Image (cartoon, rainbow, N blue to C red):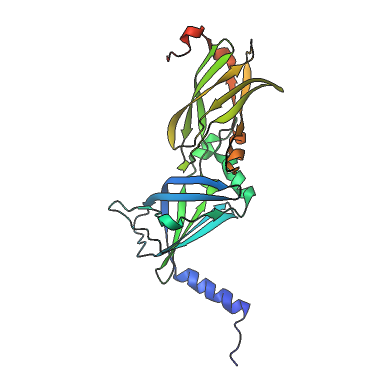
Amino acid sequence: MPKAESSSDASDQEDITDMLETGGELYIARFFISSQDSRSLRLDVEGTLCAGFDIGWVSTVRVRLYYRNILVGEITSPDTQMIPDSDNYVITKWRIDEEPIMHIKSMVGFKNFFCDIMPKENANNELDVRKQATAALRVSPSGHRLTMSINLANMPRMTTTIKRIRIFGEKIKITMILTNPSPVTLHAEVDSEFVLKKGEDTVGHLAALFEIIPGENECVLAGNISPNVSGMVTLKGSSYEDSDESWQQYVITLFEININMDEAVVCVEADESEDE
């Protein structure tokens, strides 16, 4: 009878296979994620291959998401190609009838990823600037399978700049600029709710279509405010009424910045629709 393969033999075989794989790097230009339900997501990745790396004629694409050493989730899509264009740019092109769904293995790692990229007071932005969104690439010895591993901890944090605060009686409108240096993209189907906090007291309720989009984007929040609010207040994400009851409802609650209400411009009602 043939001798059964020992665990050490199997491990040695895996090590040999890893050594035979060819490796490279992808500079991520767009990392699009969307909520599927409370435990899963869809994603698309695109970017530029590093110089000198030949992706070959792969026919299966595997994507693994990590947060540091925590495996957040993975998907494997057979019968999928990634063909570079003339600029060595590639896009994950899933089959329309079989777009893969990634089941989240570690919600702790997934939450930490969003904690890292959402705006945060007193964050070390100098450290975030040095982060670079890349994916490690490995092509199997047969040339059929491409494995893309992405460390979500390398995504830099978003920052905010308050452009304008206007008050019309009991109404308030805050215009802020969101700067996202990462390729992370997360769209929203409905408005998110926000609150203004003065210490433990809630002094305002606002709503806005809050989306995570690369580059600089304007976000306008509108709602009501209590009279005679001055000094520093905290603008916090409160809720996102998602019909799918997905993990996206949690994301908005991570948003928190300080605002100086002494910089607000008090306007008459007739000025409400005007834009400075």
Q: Quadrant of residue 202?
A: top right
Give the residue at the far left of this rendering: 86
Work out whether residue 16 or residue 74 is closer to the camera in this orientation and state it: 74
Does residue 235 appear anywhere in the picture?
no
Report x, y in % for residue 25.
42, 55
* Residue 239 sits in quarter: top right
In the foreground, 172 or 156: 172
Q: Indicate the position of residue 183 as horizontal and vertical percent values.
A: 45, 42
Residue at position x 50%, y 30% in the image: 209
Q: Residue at x 44, y 38 (%)?
A: 214
**Residue located farthest toward the bottom when viewing the structure as drawn:** 1
Q: Quadrant of residue 82?
A: bottom left
Residue at the image position 49 percent from the left and 69 percent from the top: 18
Residue 30 percent coordinates (x, y): 42, 45
Q: Position of residue 234 (x, y in %)?
A: 63, 24
- Please give left or right for residue 27 compared with residue 192 in the image: left
Query: Between 79 and 149, which is closer to the camera in this rendering?
Result: 79
On-image quarter of the C terminus: top left
